[in-house]
């Protein structure tokens, strides 16, 4: 067991369909710029509404990834 | 850009199926009495359980709508 | 109307698919050892990530059940 | 089991005597304008003080009632 | 000293200039439909940004007013 | 002075009369299964409402008791 | 209307009987050393338990009083 | 670098004009009785309303000052 | 309506004059390195005090900006 | 990757020496009755004081362990 | 069992070495001016950093002491 | 006194030994990529457990550093 160091970034993913897809989209976008993502914490869930219907789900997440791996 | 004023009301939607449907039901009900809904904030999620199974999802939301439009 | 007494336990359910299934799994597991489950409160939602994808959803819930029934 | 929709309103009841009476007063006042009250959540308790004595208890509550019944 | 009952509503005021003006706008709008406003609690402050500048301040407030006066 | 270890359990007591009696009922029920209760923390107070009146008080408490005594 | 300045102090009152009496005791003790008490905010309620019964209620309050009066 | 000890006190400043002036008034009043004030933390902002207008801003602050200097 | 992805960063702006200017300074600095800023959330407000006067306002904000635009 | 289910219990460990030892003592005691402990979350740290000195550290922790392993 | 009244004060202790020493320093300083300290609650832990190293630990504590003993 | 701008990043440091060492490791890692670190705020403390013993301490911190210095 080694002493890992992680960093967390805060990202808002969105989806017209579901909370899960909004989180998936956040992780997919984050994985373009950070490697070694380890976990996600859901911080807040909101919806944007248009014409009296939910247009998309907006989920704020903290994404944790390892800083010290190669 | 004008200076909008919004009001928030707190509603609990429920659904036997999913968190998303419970929120949709809350928005649908609210849209019967308020116009110009702009966003939803999810505040709390609970489930009612019957016979050791989840009978329905109960999601408390704050619904924001514009007060100053015509 | 009688004066019920309830107990709450804290359980983390997980699922590769959705938040709802993770909660269902937590309730199913809890129902093996406690009877008379009445409600669930969702406390925290996290995801475990592997290979830059969400491997499973981890949902911490409080499960309330009646202590005084026979 | 049907999919109920509830609304919550925030009311501050007061009483010179006790927390319980302040909540009772809040519910009694609310029941003049909303039907089908189902539950109360106590949010905050304060006291107004006069002449170095508690003059009345002020209890902020959220009152939940059914929107969809007739 | 009588036992007053108050209600609180949640409103978001906005202003291009300052937090204080956004709160003033929320109170002015609320005073069109409720009488006897007694206090305001500031809940959240956000800004909408356009062209990398703050376009307006959005302040969520709870507005308390007396229910039992004539 | 020894190094005690305590456990906390979360219980919801109820009473038609008062917050204090609801907490007493929670402690009485808990004392059937745990010994050496040392303290109670009040976590949340709610009321169940029937016929527009408070039917009973529901008080969620954490009950702390000593694990290491004989 | 003048611009008052208030100070708040944090006190824990206790009573073998009720939450209200514990708060009263806190205010009575505070009034020995501070004048012009204006309000009390209840912060936390705990009980000390002896012999599996509630021995006394411990209520943490913030007490607000005017600094600038004579 | 020495090991300073600080104390924090909680004060409510008010002003008819702005949040900033209310905080300034709190610091000015506190500086009459404590020396070596180092920082202020804003805890809560409220307004007192009269005649449907904001009569004054009430800002609760924690004021930190050094205990160990001479 | 497309599925935007946003990132939030946490910045502390400061100003000798006002909360608003401190936030403006935070946004101005952030806009040197990130494009497409959409909103600001105010997280915490503190003051640095020198010679018993407020020397500058320190406002912690979260700044949200679009990740997926070109 | 399987869908694990975890339970969390809340324990208060204590030590005359350090926060770390208090947590170690909580884990050691819990490991007498639960197997497969996976993580600890520190919830609250307090000290008991005697003769104006810290007599022992009291650390409230949540201890998570696997329910579904054999 | 008598009905004790306690007061809490908020103090920030610091130490170049450890969290525990910072709390000890806070208690030692407080014991110069208040008698009968009973407990400490740790509220917040921060570090001051100089030359990219932790220069000292700053721990905000609430210190509770008996008001009514002689 | 100038108007500094700071940024905060969120890092999780770990150590098999102590909370302090975990924070030191987080600061040491962060200092490889950011200059002018000024303070650390401890956000959350957890432990990873293996074989019923604490394998390492995981401390989430926010690290504040100056953006505007050269």
Image (cartoon, coloured by chain):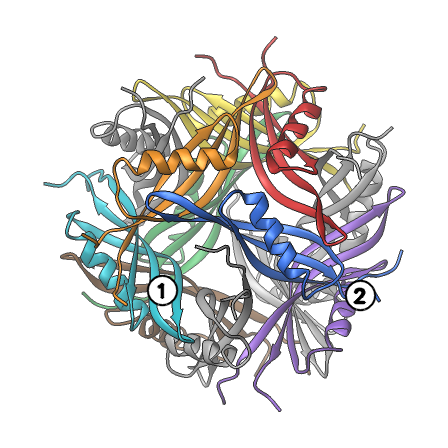
Chain colours: C purple, D brown, E green, G cyan, I yellow, J blue, K orange, L red
Q: Could you tell me residue L68's position as x and y percent?
A: 59, 14
Label 1 chain ID: D
Residue C21, label in figure? 2
Q: Residues within 10 Å of mark 2 (few under 14, many from 20)?
A: some
> For the N terminus of chain D, which image quadrant?
bottom right
| K13 horizontally vs G39: left or right | right
Marks 2 and 1 sit apart, C-alpha to C-alpha, by: 38 Å
Q: Could you tell me residue L26's position as x and y percent?
A: 67, 30
| L59 horizontally vs I17: left or right | right
Residue at mark 1 = D59
- From where the camera sits, is residue D41 visible? no
Question: Quarter of the image holding residue C63?
Answer: bottom right
Question: Which of the pair C61/L68 is nearer the observer?
Answer: C61
Question: Quarter of the image holding residue J27?
Answer: bottom right
> Residue at (60%, 71%) from the top-left corner?
C8
Q: Secondary structure at mark 2?
A: helix
- From where the camera sits, is residue E11 visible? yes
Quick one: which residue is furthest to the left in this view?
A: G70
Which is closer to the viewer, label 2 or label 1?
A: 2
Q: Does E65 sit above or below residue L17?
A: below
Question: Which of the pair I58/C36 is nearer the observer?
Answer: C36
| I48 horizontally vs L15: left or right | left
Q: Does L24 sit above or below residue G45?
A: above
Label 2 chain ID: C
Q: Could you tell me residue J21's position as x and y percent?
A: 58, 46
Q: Could you tell me residue I29's position as x and y percent?
A: 60, 19
Q: Secondary structure at mark 1?
A: strand
Q: Residues within 10 Å of mark 1 (few under 14, many from 20)?
A: many
> Residue at (69%, 36%) from the top-left corner?
L15
> For the C terminus of chain D, which image quadrant?
bottom right
> Residue at (50%, 25%) from the top-left corner?
K16
| Discs 2, 1: same chain | no
């Amino acid at each position: 067991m080694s002493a890992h160091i992680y960093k967390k970034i805060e990202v808002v993913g969105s989806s017209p369909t579901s909370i899960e897809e909004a989180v998936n989209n956040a992780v997919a976008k984050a994985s373009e710029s950070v490697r070694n993502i380890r976990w996600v914490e859901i911080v807040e869930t909101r919806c944007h509404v248009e014409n009296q219907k939910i247009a998309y789900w907006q989920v704020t997440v903290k994404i944790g990834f390892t800083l010290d791996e190669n």
